[in-house]
C-alpha cells in the first residue's frame, strides 16, 4: 500500500524548519522556499548560528518567524512536523543533525526529509501512531523509459531551464503557476526536487531516479497530472551548461515542453563553483536550448519565450536597468518574477 505523505505539509500542520547554517550560508534553499511558498503553518525556524535574529534582515523575506538555536527551544512553539530545510553538499545528512532529528521524533514530531540519506530505516522504531517520516528522495516504482507521449497532450507545457543550478527555476515555475491560477487557468505545478515536492505535495525527485528512467519518470508526471490542465509548469533542474548536471535533458524529453523560460542570475559570468566554465552570451544559450528541445522528440520547434532574471542582490534601480538590458540583448520579454511577478512571463507563453 502506498502511503500518502502530502498531508504533512498542508495548511493545518504546524511546522518547524531545521536550517542550521542555512539562513546565513548558501545551503538553506529548501527551507527558504518553504517559507515563501508552503501552505503549511510554519511556526519556528531552527538555526544554531542565527538564533534570536531577524528573518527579514537575514534573507529579505518579510515574515515575522521566530528563529531559535535548537530543537528544545523549537518545541515550545508546539510544532507537529520537522522539515529539513538544508541541502548540504552531496545531500548527505551531517552527523551532528542526527541528535536533533532523534530529539524531534522522540517528542512526537513527524519528519519531512529531502536529503539523500533515508531516515525512516534509522528512526522507524521510534515512531508513535500517527507519526510519519517522509523520505522524499526515493525512486518511484513502476518506471519506464520515455516515449515522447507528452507531446500528444493539447495543453501548454512550460519548462524552466537555466544558465546554472540554484538560480531560481523552481521559484519561477511556482510564480508562473500562481499567475496562471489567478487568471482562472487550470494550472498544475510538477515538482522535480525536494523543495518543489514539499511545497506541492507531489512530484518526482529526479536526482533519485536512475538515468535510464529519468525521462520516463517526468513523462508519467506530465501525463498523470497534466491531462486535465490548461497549463503545466515543470520545475527545472540543473543546466545544460553545467558539467555536473544530468537533469535538464530528461526534463526536456519527458515533458515535451511547448515553451521554455530561461532563468539567469544577473551579473553571473561563470558556472558557480566551476570558474573554468564560462556562461556564453544569452543569445547563444537560447539557441542551444531551442536546438536541443526541438530534436528531443518534439514534432515542431520549441522556443525560449522569455527570460526570468534573478536580481536578488541588486537594488530596484539596478534590477530595472538589467531587465531592460536583457530585453534589448535577446529581444524577449524579461522580468524578475520574485521581485515583481510572473505576468510578463505568462503573457509570453499564452
Image (spheres, grey):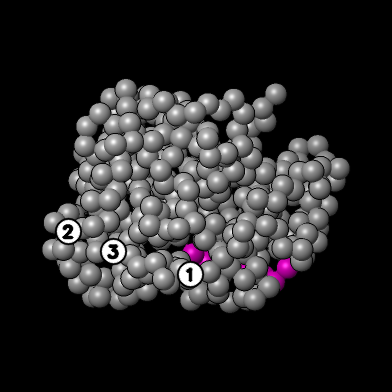
Q: Is residue 11 visible?
A: no
- Mark 3, other Cα within 10 Å: few <14 / some 14–19 / many ≥20: few
Q: Secondary structure at mark 2?
A: helix
* Residue 108 drawn above or below residue 144: below
Question: Which residue range is magenta in the image?
Answer: 63-70
Query: Which element carries disc 1, helix, strand or loop?
Result: loop
- Gap between marks 1 and 3 measured at Cα: 16 Å
Q: Which residue is mark 2?
A: 330
What number is the disc on residue 136? none
Between the residue at mark 3 and the residue at mark 2, the CA separation in whole angstroms equals 13 Å
Q: Quadrant of residue 296?
A: top left
How busy is the neighbourhood of tag 2: few (under 14 within 10 Å), some, or many (20 plus)?
A: some
Predominant secondary structure in magenta? loop
18 left or right of 296?
right
Q: Quadrant of residue 254?
A: top left
- The residue that mark 1 highlights is 273
Residue located 77% across and 63% down the image: 95
- Say left or right for 100 vs 39: right
Please report the residue visible at 46 percent of the width from the left and 68 percent of the height from the top.
274
Residue 156 screen position, x and y as percent: 28, 33
Nearer the observer, 55 or 171: 171
Amino acid at each position: 500500500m502506498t502511503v500518502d505523505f502530502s498531508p504533512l505539509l498542508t495548511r493545518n500542520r504546524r511546522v518547524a524548519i531545521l536550517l542550521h547554517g542555512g539562513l546565513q550560508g548558501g545551503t538553506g534553499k529548501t527551507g527558504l522556499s518553504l517559507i515563501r511558498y508552503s501552505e503549511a503553518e510554519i511556526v519556528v525556524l531552527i538555526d544554531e548560528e542565527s538564533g534570536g535574529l531577524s528573518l527579514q534582515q537575514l534573507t529579505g523575506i518579510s515574515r515575522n518567524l521566530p528563529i531559535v538555536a535548537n530543537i528544545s527551544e523549537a518545541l515550545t512553539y508546539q510544532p507537529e512536523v520537522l522539515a529539513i530545510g538544508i541541502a548540504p553538499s552531496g545531500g548527505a545528512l551531517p552527523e551532528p543533525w542526527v541528535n536533533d532529528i532523534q530529539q524531534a521524533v522522540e517528542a512526537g514530531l513527524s519528519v519531512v526529509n529531502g536529503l539523500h540519506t533515508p531516515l525512516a530505516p534509522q528512526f522507524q522504531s521510534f515512531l508513535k501512531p500517527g507519526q510519519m517520516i517522509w523520505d522524499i528522495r526515493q525512486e518511484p516504482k513502476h518506471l519506464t523509459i520515455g516515449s515522447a507521449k507528452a507531446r500528444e497532450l493539447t495543453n501548454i507545457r512550460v519548462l524552466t531551464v537555466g544558465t546554472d543550478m540554484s538560480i531560481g527555476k523552481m521559484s519561477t515555475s511556482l510564480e508562473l503557476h500562481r499567475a496562471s491560477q489567478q487568471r482562472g487557468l487550470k494550472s498544475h505545478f510538477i515538482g522535480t526536487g525536494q523543495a518543489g515536492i514539499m511545497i506541492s505535495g507531489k512530484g518526482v525527485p529526479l536526482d533519485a531516479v536512475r538515468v535510464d528512467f529519468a525521462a520516463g519518470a517526468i513523462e508519467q508526471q506530465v501525463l498523470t497530472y497534466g491531462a486535465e490542465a490548461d497549463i503545466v509548469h515543470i520545475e527545472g533542474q540543473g543546466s545544460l551548461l553545467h558539467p555536473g548536471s544530468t537533469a535538464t535533458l530528461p526534463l526536456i524529453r519527458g515533458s515535451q515542453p511547448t515553451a521554455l523560460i530561461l532563468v539567469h542570475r544577473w551579473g553571473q559570468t561563470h558556472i558557480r563553483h566551476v570558474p573554468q566554465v564560462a556562461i556564453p552570451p544569452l543569445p547563444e544559450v537560447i539557441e542551444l536550448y531551442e536546438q536541443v528541445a526541438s530534436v528531443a522528440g518534439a514534432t515542431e520547434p520549441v522556443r525560449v519565450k522569455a527570460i526570468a532574471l534573478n536580481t536578488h542582490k541588486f537594488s530596484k534601480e539596478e534590477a530595472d536597468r538589467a531587465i531592460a538590458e536583457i530585453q534589448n540583448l535577446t529581444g524577449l520579454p524579461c522580468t524578475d518574477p520574485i521581485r515583481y511577478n510572473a505576468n510578463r512571463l505568462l503573457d509570453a507563453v499564452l
